[in-house]
Image (cartoon, rainbow, N blue to C red):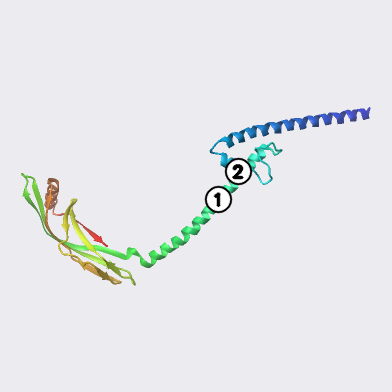
Amino acid sequence: MACICACIGKRLDALVEAQRERLERRRRACLTRLWKRVCDALASSATYRGLWCQQLCFDSGLCLCCTCLCHPFHCVWSLVERRYVDGAKHVATFACHCLQFWTPLSVTVFLVWFLYRPDRFHPRMDGGVLARLDVLGDADNGSRMIRYDMSVDISFRNSHRRLGIRYLDVGAAAFYNGTKLGPADNYFPTSFRQGPKNTTVLHPVFRGVVAVDSSVVAELERERAAGMVHVRVTLDLM
């Protein structure tokens, strides 16, 4: 009786194991067919044809597009892991190339700036004399002009200890309320050199007559009544 029960138990275990294997094979076949359809749909697309077909093959020789015995979920995880590792490698390579390019360039720019120091050049206007700024013309016919006579003192300071500065051309212009009064009457030196730790003072003079509109005349009369006139002087260096 015990022998018969043992045989029946072994037979039942064998049937259960066989049924389990059949269910596992069916499940794998169903998942493989489903994944193959997805791969075929992606491979037929013009956008993913060259990308997916290249990355769906692994080092083991198995491919998701065939009816191999590899598990589909394992293949998906391997694909994601491989793309993540490749992306990290690309990022690291790009960062390394950026460091190799920008580090020497940054050091070179800093050394050039530290040696030449363009901020050690300081042009400034020390003072000025406004001898005349009158309004000419008749307000009835609309022909209004401003007659101006002004001189300023502009100093150029070279604070470098070893380097000199060569000026190829220097120009100055005066503006009042957006209206250009004109360039300086006296001509600056066409070209001169300034030595290290040196200060050069130029004295441009502005004289002339310029036509203006009524708004500029009104602003000038208001500032003259207040006792302060704002004139802007610009420099053109080459």
> Quadrant of residue 43 in the image?
top right
Q: Position of residue 30 (x, y in %)?
A: 68, 31
> Quadrant of residue 167 in the image?
bottom left
- Say which element carries label 2: helix
Image depth: mark 1 or mark 2 in front: 2
* Identity, as a three-letter code, of the amino acid under mark 1: His
Who is closer to the viewer here, 67 or 159?
Answer: 67
**Whether residue 137 is visible:** yes
Crowd around label 2: few <14 · some 14–19 · many ≥20 (10 Å): few
Screen quadrant of the C terminus: bottom left
Screen quadrant of the N terminus: top right
Q: Position of residue 41 (x, y in %)?
A: 59, 33
Q: Mark 2 highlights which residue?
A: 54
Q: Position of residue 91 (x, y in %)?
A: 54, 50
**Whether residue 231 is visible:** no
Q: Mark 1 highlights which residue?
A: 90
Task: Tell me how far mark 1 sits from mark 2, CA to CA.
Answer: 17 Å
> Quadrant of residue 14 in the image?
top right
* Identity, as a three-letter code, of the amino acid under mark 2: Gln
Q: Are marks 1 and 2 in contact (CB under 8 Å)?
A: no
Q: Residue at x 39, y 65 (%)?
A: 112
Nearest to N terminus: mark 1 or mark 2: 2
- Say which element carries label 1: helix
Crowd around label 1: few <14 · some 14–19 · many ≥20 (10 Å): few
Q: Position of residue 96 (x, y in %)?
A: 53, 56
Who is closer to the viewer here, 147 or 93?
Answer: 93
Q: Is residue 209 left or right of residue 55?
A: left
Residue 53 is marked as none
